[in-house]
Amino acid sequence: MANFLLSNPLTTMDTVPAILITLSIMLLVGFLFTRVTKLAKLPNVTAYILTGVLLGPVMNLVIGEPFIPESIRVGMDFITDVALAFIAFGVVRYFKFDVLKKSGSKIFIITLFESLMAMAVSFGAMMAMNLVGFQIDWELALLLAAIASATAPASTMMTIRQFGAKGDFVNTILQVVSLDNAIALILFSVSMAVITGNESGGINLGQLALPLIYNLVLVVAGYLLGLLLFWVTPPKRTKDNRLIIAVAFMLGFSGIASLLDISPLLGVMAMGMAYTNIAPDESLFRQIDAFSPPILTLFFVLSGMRLQLQALASIGIVGIVYFLTRIVGKYAGASLGSVVARSSDNNKKYLGLALIPQAGVSLGLAALGSRILESYGHPEYALMLTTIIVAAGVLYEIFGPPAAKYSLYITKSYTLDKKVQIIGPQPGSTSVSATDNSNV
């Protein structure tokens, strides 16, 4: 008993109780941190990432060894894939074809500009770091740039819901964010193909086209699966069974895609897109929203645990440059895209502010990219990739929501009245109070 108390208890337990207690610690500490971040009006995802930093690198320094054994942390990697399936399915919740038809090609133009501009500016900045003494390999720079194109839908949506924002500006944000992550996944897939081809001895057109073909097949399969999901979950089926079937579809599809070494995110997004466009309401999405918080909490905590404080100290300047240049790329791209698309003045001036948050999909892509870099014998680049994305993600979740809030305020997308209409029907009514208690 004395040895048990003096040593790290988790390292002396059997695997099953150690895992269960670890999960409990991660969830409870994550919840407690939200009490702190709520006072600062920061999103919950910031608290979860900071929880991971505390339980991971900070505790490692305090006790001189991993507080959560490495074997347990590695064994939880599947949580990343599960969480990404939920994120991908929900991100297209507002990807309505009838709404997009009204917008015409404007949304596509704006999204292409802000995604590609963020990627181009970030890649250029990372490569320019080599001119001032930093060693940034082009493969690492390319992955960072591809991930820079992604936006965090959860943080942006939370800000919109919190203030009951609505109107044309809000509709543009929702549509751009939905398309944004699809483009980011395509850019990431092409980047991985370039890196894989280079490591195998050469890059040819076939190697670049192959991942696009795979993802296109995956999108078609996902879309068909979304139609099947609607057919097997009719309104007469109980809510519990609808949720069970939907989760089974997402996990099964993700597992098959991973078995083929293809990212399942685009396919799961296509599944959600098919379902949301033929379903009579959003009840299934609300069920998934209620079911997923513990899974997403564990995902963000695990992301924070991957942060290496020693590496952060050595690449701090690189991380800051990435953090700033991505914002510049997003804002400039959104503004230029709005000009080319002849969009509204609000979009030209303020849309970029709503696209700053970055977590969720970006953290998942960082995890996937790190695995590839490690498999090709570049563990140092894998560490840098994860560290930069996690550290920047914390900063984006701190500064992103206030920037999004300002864009909504300056465009008069919400009022200061206590009662406002909010996006998405609520049980028993069509509106809720602006003082939403969803984060309590």
Image (cartoon, rainbow, N blue to C red):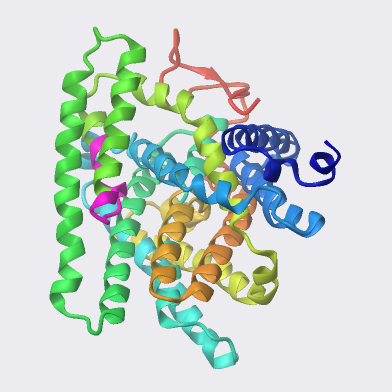
Residue 234 in magenta?
no
Say which of 153 and 284 sits in front: 284
Residue 267 in magenta?
yes
Residue 389, by quadrant, is: bottom right
Magenta stretch: dominant SS?
Answer: helix
Say which of 177 and 266 sits in front: 266
Say which of 399 and 9 sits in front: 9
From this viewpoint, is residue 110 visible?
no
- In the displayed structure, would residue 279 be above or below residue 221? above
The segment highlighted magenta reads 258-272
From this viewpoint, is residue 355 visible?
yes
Residue 382 place in picture, x, y as percent = 49, 69
- In the displayed structure, would residue 274 be above or below residue 138? above
329 left or right of 343 in image: right
Residue 81 place in picture, x, y as percent = 40, 45
Residue 133, by quadrant, is: bottom right
Residue occupying image coordinates x 75% and y 38%: 36
Residue 170, by quadrant, is: top left
- In the displayed structure, would residue 304 be above or below residue 273? below
Residue occupying image coordinates x 57% and y 68%: 324
280 left or right of 360 in image: left
Residue occupying image coordinates x 67% and y 38%: 13
